[in-house]
Amino acid sequence: MNKNDKLVVIFGVIILIVSSIGIYTFVPGNSQAKAAEVDEILTISGTMKNIPDSIIVADSNPFFPLIATPIAVNYNQNGEQSIIPLYINNFSNPSGAVDKLRNEQLKQYSIDEYVIESHENPKNVSLFCAKQFWEQSKGALIMSQNESGYILGVIATPIASYLSIPVIVADCIDGDVTRALQELGVTYSIVCGSELQGYGKTMRVTCVEDIIDLTTSILQNKFGSIDYMTLTNPIDAWPPKSLKQEKFTFGPVTLPSTASTYIKQLLTQGGKQQIGSFTIPEDYKYALIKFEGVNLDYENVDEFGDSVGFSIGADLPNIPDGLQQWEVYVGGTGGGGVADRDSNGQLIKDKVYIETVLYDRGGVTYNVGANGVWLLKSQGKVLANVVVEKLESPTYPLMKGLSSIAPYLTASHKGLIFGEPEFAFTADDDVLTDKGQTCPGYYVPRRNPELTPMLNDHIFDNIHTPLNEILASLADVNLDKDANLEFLRTYYQEKPMYIALVGGATVLPNFIYQNHVEPVDVEDTPYFFGAGTPSDVIYGNIDPIYYDWSNLANDVYTQYPFIENIVGRITGWDAQDASALVNRNLFYNEIISNLDEWKDTFGLLMGGGNDFQKPMIKYRIFGDLLGMVPHGEPMKYPTGYSEISGQRTLDQIVEPLGFTAREAWVDAAMVKGFSDEAIHQIKSETTLLSKLFFRENQVKQLAGEGNVVGGDIMESSNFIWANAHGCQNLFGMSGIELTSAGLGGPIIHEVLTRILPIVRGGFIGPGSHLGQVGMYNTRNVANMDFGPSFMWLESCICGKIDGVYPKSGVGQAILHSGVASLIASPTGSNIAGGYLEPKNRMYDNPISVWNAQKKTERDAKQGIYPDPHFGFLLYTDLCNDLKNNDVSIGLAFRNAKNDYLPKDADWELWWAPPLVSTGNPLWDSILNSEETKKSSSSGPGPMLEAKYVSFQEYMLFGDPALNIYEPINQG
């Protein structure tokens, strides 16, 4: 080849290269962006086609639910809605909550499912969906395929549903994108952020405020008004990067059983034993702790309730004892764990797994403790695995990716979304006390109480203030004038906004009020569950006194605090469960349509330990003479209070609502009981003491599977009222009768039921662990099969989500297992005295207690009952509102809270004991003694602090707009 030929070839190759580049980089002329006005955007619409019965998207990428949202829920030009289920799924570890909806409750929507697999690319998926499901579209919503694109995209996605236009996710507007948009006939684009160029006439939204303004214009133009808003935090789908890690394994270690079947070991070795320790590397400012505790002797778990408890505390002698024991974790494989099971439901691994973050604890050593409860074994083996990761930042969500379902929920209700990464709060270098000090330790408050003032200021400044500004804009109110705040609260009092919180407490934090029993105080905090009263009241309250988080915090314009707007929270183990909860609420009526017997059934479950006395004679003997009882502490002795409270509920709530009641009391209300064979094994295969004195018939009568019906009632009931003692990991129904069982016949049993309440509060006895098999702990509840019930859980701490890994929380296990709407408390709840009137003196005698009980029983036969108080009063008013006005669960809950303090503030009582149970008898005796003393008074009084706690504490989990079924209204 000569020189000229070579030049010709080279020149030709250059032309081909340039031409090929042009093919992939050329942007058609009609894609050149020109600014679009709001009025033009309002005219945009699309025409859908090939809509499937439902959509299932992988949880591997948070853009997938956004892309699917306008397919799953959209509106035509006349504002008519089309909606199908949208599920988020992990295909390698699918949620049973999602499977239940797809395969049982909403199987009519599973014939033609469109599936987005985990390996797919968001850009390709969005372009395919645009072509597959749109006949034509005048517009498209475009967002960058990165974190900043997602943060704005979550807020903007409902716009795509309202205009029936596709969501396009891309790194750039390349030839593939432009061709797809051309084929659809797109002439307008709404672009999130400044990174991407537009297509056709473009409206660019670069901040959340821009998107809210645009969404508001679209909603008002298309539907006329707005009554639904979602708060979320897109940062929950973008956890901080892990930079490096260290791993530790402890065990297998053999431990003695501290079950009450081995009473000597329980009394002498009942505390935890250290099984290992690990040190956080010095340069780990933000340390993510991943802990797995395993019960290796698990073969009797389901039949006997065996479990292993674990705790992880800091080896720092100058911090409170609670942090030395529990700074990282306290819980176990039963209360706090979720067992691995095979496809037949058989347990294959009994474990607890949690994650949490520590701030500025580099160089600190942590001790891992464990204690085992095996009813048939005198010892067992345990194992613990710890991974410590160095994070780039402390903003680590425990509930990950929930924001991705927020657009679907919002669009279904014709609402708008407000969300910012700045909503999140954790300890960090710039979070300083009044003394200018940082707060090393647990990364969120309650186990780090010094963070509380900064958290509450943060919520006021970064969430409440901008939320009020949005609400004011929607109501056309100018908040620059102080007087207009009163007008704003009056406006929303009469026209309340539904506000759905979608996310966990790290990214959408609870406000924390001071609590007289569980104080925000470094030395006095009960670190097992934490300081203060976590609450979502702040999200519905227009005019709280700013920066006031006292126990008796009030509002600006009302005598008592008042919640103007209607608040509920969407939570879950993960995005899968959150999507299941959303669909369970949105398709509630279709789910219950064939559940005829279930929807007319009310489950009433009344646990033990709610009756309280101060018996004078016993105080003199066991207190003053023997020193076994703290002076002034009420004891768990029968008064008839619990029985009359349950009967009042049946007569004044259940019957008027039109329900058929199923009821269970104390031990019969446990989730399950022992088989005859299991009871025989306890007698024959444990200790000589059991072989000689264990009475099988006695235990069968109390806890035999033929007599225990609580779990069956819950699974068979629409409305559920459960009154129990509990904590963040569990709640229990069993009482002193079962604790006293297992050692001798009727006479010894009767003596023990009278003596044990005096000694350590009645938590320790020969039958202390016989109730474990029937405990509503995370392991048992996660394996239950609820209908889409409404459940009020009157128990301490079961609604706690702050700092709790989702699978370790019993409230989240309830939602995972099918409940549609749950009201529960994240702190210690109050018993309304636990006695009956008349009570005219501090100390009780048998005659006065008997007289009060008989008088109350006679009155009850005439339909006259003692007034309800605390949680019972809230529940009564809620149910009456449902009966009389057929309102949503959120509105009934708001109204009941607002009516509560004006009704109950002046009522006087002697004491208000807590409903705490940890599942560990030794810990229970200590914690309940401390809390009961704080909840007592020297004489009858209003105990207003306790009543404010009742107003603040209860939280609604589920869609606040759900209108649940009552036979009196829909039957």
Image: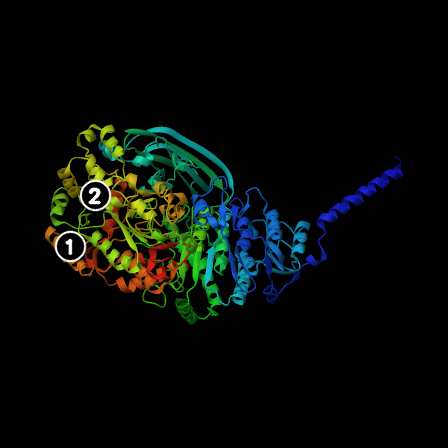
Return the residue at label 1.
853
Residue 577 position within the rendered picture, expressed as x and y whole percent measured from the top left: 44, 47
Verify CB contact (< 8 Å) between mark 1 and mark 2: no
Is residue 574 shown to the viewer in this render?
Answer: no
Q: Residue 39: percent from the left, percent from the top?
A: 60, 67
Quadrant containing the N terminus is top right
Asked if residue 88 lies left or right of residue 968, the reply is right
Q: Position of residue 67 (x, y in %)?
A: 56, 51
Image quadrant holding the C terminus, namely: bottom left
The residue under label 1 is which amino acid type?
Gln
Q: Which residue is mark 2?
A: 736
Q: CA distance from mark 1 to mark 2?
A: 20 Å
Judge whether residue 375 can be spotted in this image.
Answer: yes
SS label for mark 2: helix
Residue under the point 20% across and 50% down: 611
Q: What secondary structure is marked by label 1?
A: helix
Quarter of the image for residue 559 reads: bottom left
Asked whether 216 or 715 is in front, the reply is 715
Q: Residue 962, image x and y in percent?
A: 41, 58
Name the quadrant containing residue 647: bottom left
Q: Is residue 382 left or right of residue 231?
A: left
**Mark toward the start of the polypeptide (1 vs 2):** 2
Position of 528 with respect to 150 (left or right) is left
- Disc 2 marks a residue whose amino acid type is Ile
Mark 1 crowdedness (10 Å alpha carbons): few <14, some 14-19, many ≥20? many
Q: Nearer the viewer, residue 657 or 398?
A: 657
Number of residues whose C-alpha sits closer than 10 Å to that of mark 2, classed few (under 14), some (14–19) or many (20 or more): many
